[in-house]
Structure formats: C-alpha cells, structure tokens
Amino acid sequence: MRDSRPKRPPARPAVSPEERDLFMAAVADAQPLGQHERDRVAPPKVVNVVRRAEPPVRVKLAITGDPTMFEMRAPGVSHNELAAARRGTAHFEETVDLHGDTVVAATQKLEAFMFAAVKNGRRCVLIIHGRGLHSEGNSVLRNMVIDQLAGPMSGWVHAATTAAVRDGGDGATVVLLRSGR
C-alpha cells in the first residue's frame, strides 16, 4: 500500500552551540545597510507568449454559390445540415462583429474569435462582416471571411453559409464548427 501523504523536505541539520558562537562572532561587526545604500533590483519582467491558434489540419471545403449567397461544406456534410442556418432558425452561441475594422484587424479578431469558440466547444457562431455598402459594392471583409474560413481556418469549419435575412443576410456568415478537436 502506497503512502499518499506528501513527503516532507529533509530537516535542517542541527547547529551545535560552538558553530552558532562562531557565526555570531563572525557577523558581530556587521551593520545593516541604510535605506539609501541598498541596491534596488527590478522585478523580473513577465513575458506573455502569444501562441498562434492553428486549426488542426486544412480541409478542402466544397463551396457553392457566389460571394453574396454561398455555402461551404466539409467532406461528408449534407446540404440538410445547413438548412437551419439558411432558414434563420439556428441558435448562435457566439457572435463577432467586424464592422469598421481594417482587414488586418478583422483577420486577427476573427482568428481569436474562432480559436476561442472552438476551445470553448461552441458549435454554431455568427460572423457579422457587413455588405460592403461603403466599399463601392465590394465587401472586402466578407471576402476576407470567406477566404479565411475556406483556407487557414478550414480545419475548424464543419460548414458555413450566408446568414438568413433576419440574421444579417449577405452581411453575415453562419459557421458550424467541428466538435471534438
């Protein structure tokens, strides 16, 4: 039978009275340093290492439609699995709004959002990117979202589609995430 109690550190060896007297004689002339004589040592710097969130493996997603009304599916995913998202009856567990962000900032925000959603076991998320009405009809953010979901983030994507009109229409994307990763 194993003892589950934590082991104690070894006790310090006892100091004999002669050794104690020798030490006290050696430090008898020592004076404490004054407040201004002490060296100030800066505390160690804490380094936050930001690890880039990588999806497990890139997956070739089947994409149908056009950039305004599209559907993308991982291999083996049926059209019926996206039916609730297309109808607007899907329950979104998380939402991110990329309106007003630059492409670089939106990409970083999207990556952090997707990583957190997968890490927290979310299954359905909504990405609001806008229609591009202020970008001469070309939704730069929507195109970035589609490119990221179909490319570097494809390992997290089970399926994705343009949101239903009540959820933002072509200004938003519904993403079904993979589970168990």
Image (spheres, grey):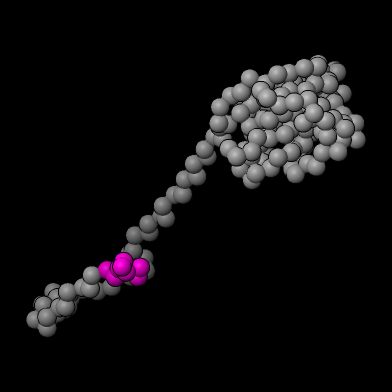
- On the image, the x and y values in percent for residue 32 come to 28, 73
- Give the image location of residue 87, x and y in percent: 88, 32
| Left or right side of 3 for 159 | right
Q: Quadrant of residue 144?
A: top right
- In this rendering, would 72 be left or right of 32? right
Q: Quadrant for residue 123, please give it.
A: top right
Instruction: State which region is magenta.
Output: 1-9
Figure quadrant of the C terminus: top right
Q: Is residue 162 visible?
A: yes
Furthest residue in direction right, as rendered: 166
Residue at 63% from the left image edge and 32% from the top image edge: 156
Q: Residue furthest left?
A: 18
Choose between 70 and 44: the one closer to the eye.
70
Relative to 139, say whether 119 is above or below.
Answer: below
Which of 66 and 11 lies nearest the eye of the viewer?
Answer: 66
* Residue 5 on the magenta span: yes
Is 66 displayed left or right of 43 in the figure? right
